[in-house]
Amino acid sequence: MFMYDTYVKAFETYLMSINKSFYTKKQYTLDAKQFAEIIQHTEHINEALQHYAKEIQETYQKVNTINRKFASIRQFLTFLQLRGVITAYNEALIQPLAKLDTELDVLKEKQFKRALSYWPYQYDIAQNAEHEWLALRNAAIVFTVAELGIKPAELVRMEWKHINKQTKEVIVLASKTFRSLPISTRLLELLDDYKRFTEQFMPLTDFSPYVWLGVGNKMGEPLTVKTIERIFKSMSEQMEFKITATNLRYYTIQKELIQQQETESLFEQFGYARKGVLTEREQRFPKNY
């Protein structure tokens, strides 16, 4: 009987030597230890892998978890091969499982309308200037994501110079590219209201080029993606259904796809690098829209 557990500590050192991150080293080592425990009474490597794969798939439900563990063990077996401990093994036994095309989380019509009305209501009942400004800013954020369908990372890059009121267009910056999108009069007016209030409430930030500012931020610095996530999390807790910038964005994308019924121009509009990515999203949208 071969004792695989005697090599787990050396495997951890090996992972350090090839500059794996702390998290990867920790997780791969734990997975290797679990592997050694599961197969400790198994004689041959392929028999061991069959037993391990069966045990893991019966224990864990998520495909991502199973595939991560299989990846750890493939790395462990590579290490054992380099050490001359084992030779060949049947790689097919621990190949990644096919991921299921799960349905995307998209807001329903009533949820979308409630999301749009949440911050305007908070503005109406605000009891001081700070709460009014926060509610107006957050309302503008939600309306911007809802109309333009942009990602949080694109949202936080917005600068006032990107908004052209004459042509009614806004430039959206991605990580390496940009695109120009039409913007409605209604959203322009909301952004104007927010800008005026910001200049009154935070007069020292009038030098800042960024659209989305925060009370606790360093003076003039934009909000982060994490702050955007917290805004939507706060809405979810109060409205008792999950709302994120992503499922709000998906609502807008799905609505456009239903109205236009083509993806040729829409994939660029919504910031996808390839048409195929938007097509894949379309196939995973709920059918009972």
Image (cartoon, grey):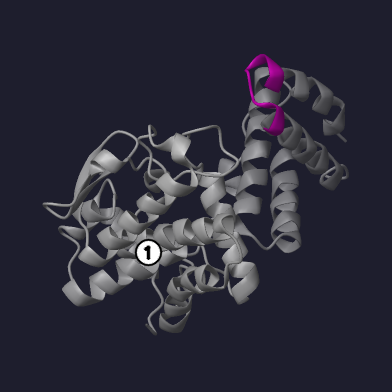
Which element is circle 1 on? Answer: helix
Tell whether 171 sits left or right of 241.
left
In the displayed orientation, state which residue is furthest to the left.
Answer: 167
Between 117 and 71, the one lying in front of the other is 117
- Amino acid at pointer 1: Phe
Whole-percent x and y of residue 131? Answer: 58, 59
For the point 20% across and 76% down, the residue is 259
Counting from the top left corner in percent of width and height, residue 192 is at 31, 55
Mark 1 Cα within 10 Å, few/some/many (few <14, many 20+)?
A: many
Quadrant of the rendered image containing residue 193: bottom left
Q: Is residue 274 magenta?
A: no
Magenta region: which residues?
A: 15-23
User: Residue 40: which quarter of the image?
Assistant: top right
68, above or below 237, in the image: above
The residue singled out by tag 1 in the image is 143
Give the answer, above or below, for where 42 lies relative to 55: above
Let me know if residue 173 appears in the view.
no
Q: Is residue 215 left or right of residue 14?
A: left
Determine the residue located farthest toward the top in the rendered image.
17
The answer, for residue 219, to whether it is visible in the render is yes
Return the x and y of residue 245 as percentages of the image width and height.
46, 59
Q: Residue at x 28, y 61 (%)?
A: 189
Q: Please name the residue shown 46% across and 71% down the image.
A: 120
